Image: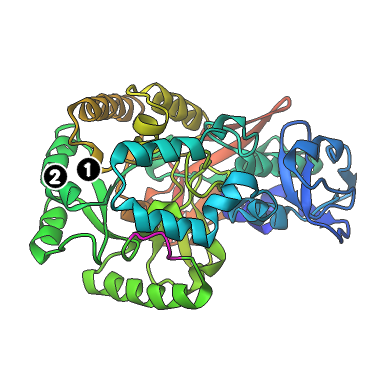
Amino acid sequence: MLQPLLDYYRIAEEAVRSVRFATQTATGDVGFFRFGSQIICYGRCSSGVASDCEGSAKFNVGNGVHGAGPVIQLPFDPAEVIENLRLERYQQQRSGGLQRFASSEPARKSYYFFRRCLPFPIRRQLQRIYFQDWDTISFPAWPVDFTVDALHEKFLRLLMEASGVKRVPFIWFWPEGAPNCLIMTHDVETSVGRDFTSQLMDLDESYGIRASFQVIPEERYELTDAYVSEIRSRGFEFNIHDLNHDGHLYRQRHEFARRAAKINRYVHRYGARGFRAGSMYRRQDWYDVFEFSYDMSVPNVAHLEPMRGGCCTVMPYFVGKIVELPVMAVQDYSLFHILNDYSIDLWAQQLDLIRVRKGLMSFIVHPDYMIEPRARKVYETLLDHLRQMVLREKIWAALPGELDTWWRARSQMKLVSRANEWEIVGPGKERARLAYAILDGGRLLYEVAERARSSS
């Protein structure tokens, strides 16, 4: 069994009759290729690779899959490709031009030095210049990218076809059989946003939404115990947001280690479980030094983020011991001030796409930007849209910490066959639901059972 496939679906291994994947030796360059006409991959491939995603169509390995009895031959390593996409390693080959200059240390240092004294209209104009090519980026796909999810579905279909089975049991993605999960998060960037926190909680509560607040622990503003206590006493969540939000967290490895140690101390001091880096800068290969439980710094697709890229999945995933809860929806700042869009049309489009794929729906909305009446009105429209959607479709509206707890529990659950029935075993099994992946012609469909038998 392919381990990423087992982790993604929590499949019962005996359900697929011992069919296994075998990878042809792929050495040499790392680059882009296609697995079928639509799925862009990044890694090593025995059939060759392109140096950019635009050239990936020349290396389509969709016909390079071969079955020999119980063995499925692939011209690449599926686990390597999935990890490369989630950890955004393809970006190492793509940064160039204005993006490379803007992300360089001298440019970033200069920007953040002058940022505090630049009037907002000038900062916004500079940002619009930087993002002027956002809609020409072909990969990851806008407005939501499903590449990693499509790969898992493709591998499962291959496994089922080779096994000759039409239905494969797995543990459903969300508790109680919910079709999707929704989380709302708020990054507090200034003292103005901090002082608006209570009113924003009032607004969220009026629509039945609870959210997490990510708060900067140093330099930006004073952080009192009373402020932290109010957030938690009202059923919201308190998390750490960077160290001082100066854009330099991942500047150099030794400086990162120093800052990460301070972040860890704040995590323990406040009993926080979650983290988000300033401006969503990230280097997932460095996460091993962090001591929080989950991270929320990786966008699904980052056309409108200072650091481009994206993890290409709508599901949480593990980065070592840390659970990554990707950000799915465009940020409020980008929507209002880069796209100049004061509607929920784009948000609604992203939600519709994610709902079809049964994924995580996650938002960042800043209290700092909700003070403006026009922006607040848009956010109220979003909250009303979310409330109706949650009630109508029984979507799981959770705090990020609750999602972290669930995803960890699900990762330890197993399906076992007893008396010709499938049972879910492991801590938290009472909330889990049995589901089936069903082959319907060329499509893969999901069906959630009413309730699975469970055993200790």
193 lies left or right of 14: left
Relative to 27, residue 187 above or below: above
Picture coordinates of residue 350, whole percent (x, y): 46, 29
Write down the residue under mark 2: 196
Of 207 and 190, the residue lying toward us: 190
What amino acid is at disc 2?
A: Phe
Q: Is residue 429 something that shows in the picture?
A: no
Of residues 428 and 308, the one drawn nearer to the viewer in this rendering: 308
With respect to residue 40, does 46 lie above or below?
below
* Residue where numbered disc 1 is placed: 367
Decide which of 416, 65 is in the foreground and name it.
65
The residue range painted magenta reads 245-249
| 38 with respect to 324 (left or right) | right
Q: Quadrant of residue 369?
A: top left
Colour convention of the picture: rainbow
Q: Which residue: 48% across, 46% down?
A: 299
As shown in the figure, which amino acid type bears the numbered disc 1?
Answer: Pro
